[in-house]
Amino acid sequence: MDCGDVLAAWFAILMRGLWLLVSVAIGCAAAYAAPAQIPGAEAVYATAPPRLLQIRTLVAGAGQQTSYGSAFLVSADGLAITNYHVVSQVVLEPKTYRLEYTAADGTHGEVHLLGVDLPDDLAIVRIDKHDAPFFTFDPAAIHGDVPKGERLYAMGNPLELGFTIVEGTYNGLVEHSYIDRIHFTGALNPGMSGGPAVTPDGAVVGINVATRRGGQLVSFLVPARFAEALLRRVREVKETPDLRAEIGRQIAATRKSLYRSLREQGFRSVALGPYRGAETDAPWFNCWAQTNAGVAPKPRFAMNSTSCNSETSLFVASDLNTGNIQISHSYVSSTELNEFQFATYLAQLSQPRLVGGGPYRKWYTPERCREDFVGSASAPDRPSLRVLWCAQAYREFDDLYDVVLVAVTQDNGSEALVSRLSMQAVGYDDAMDIGRRFLDAVRVGK
């Protein structure tokens, strides 16, 4: 083979390799170009405005707004979903407030409340729109099968700036939470509450509900399955119930379930100095520790504390959030205080701190307290305790109380354990049972 034949062969091999590279490049380009064909924010928002609403709460006599939020249509006959907290003033004081909607096209009209779901912060309303386009629920969201990382688009009317779309990511349900919430990495702002968060195909995965203060792009959605269930219940009921009475019923039912769960989870014993106290195994508590060891100037006593707070608060009204549980312990030992000074400090540390006074009087009866000394001579590991028990009842909701139980050990003049259990919206029987278990767990020794 001469040089010409060799060059021709090499050229043929080179051309085949070049053609292979071109084919691969075309295939890669096509693969990278494919996502551009998936509907994005522009496509989602193009069809969204006729289905979106702004909900305003107005003072009935003056016609001026006091609050606003978002909503979205879910049926052709004018049913729409929003947050309970968007319409709570009308639920609780229907003679003082009324609701009005404004659509993206500028039309507006009256809003009628049909049903509420307090634990999941949802409400169903009806407006005078018929044959309008509406949102549907994502089947995967109803069955809990949305993959983490799914791109979502949240819509609403933030800060009255006009209807807005916000892009973010689905991160599954929040861990260690008693109430199911979706973690959404998108910027929800005031006014977007009650708006939908949808897939690229426009199907509803969640409802905008809250954002985490002190964080960036940490927001929360109510799972769509709760909205779909509320919609079904409303359709099955022929007459609108007394919603104010329904609120009381839902608070009682959800708190009963909460405290039953707390009892089932049980308490574990934890060491605090020479004492032991009760903490819960429930996964929906956040616990923190604190010490005054590094405080300057150096205090005249040493204190190590633990505090566990439940993530179980319910929004009832703008001036009433209830349903939290707190368990705390402080082991205190004197370094320079005499026994009288030490006892004075313990008295200050063991104050009950209920919240029934001042602006909260409309919700609570005056608190009542009782103080006793308890102990057991037959159980040497159980120290004598000074026990303070305070309770206040809810004026609007029958058989519900806020309770605080404080126990201070009395076996030593220079060291003590101060244990505190606070329960909101608890029934009498639950408060007594859990309180007894809490006191029984206070022990001396390992």
Image: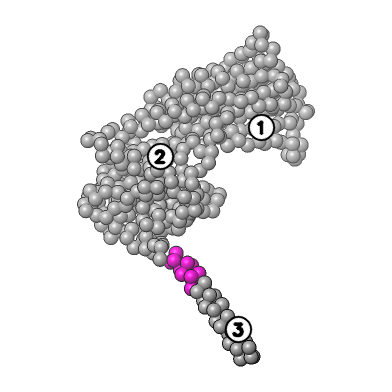
- The type of colouring in the image is one colour
Q: 415 or 141, which is in the foreground?
A: 141
How crowded pointer 3 is (Cα within 10 Å; few <14, some 14-19, many 20+) is rated as few
* First-in-chain label (1 vs 3): 3
Q: Secondary structure at mark 1?
A: strand
Q: Which residue is mark 1?
A: 305
* First-in-chain label (2 vs 1): 2
Name the amino acid, label 2.
Answer: Asp
Q: Which residue is mark 3?
A: 10
Q: How many marks are shown on the rendered structure? A: 3
| Residue ID at (36%, 33%) | 247
251 left or right of 11?
left
In the image, residue 380 above or below residue 228: above
Residue lying farthest to the top in this orientation: 378
- Is residue 33 covered in magenta? yes
Q: Secondary structure at mark 2?
A: loop
* Quadrant where the N terminus is found in the figure: bottom right
| Residue ID at (34%, 39%) | 229
Q: Which residue is mark 2?
A: 120
Name the amino acid, label 3.
Answer: Trp
* Quadrant where the C terminus is found in the figure: top right
306 left or right of 434?
right
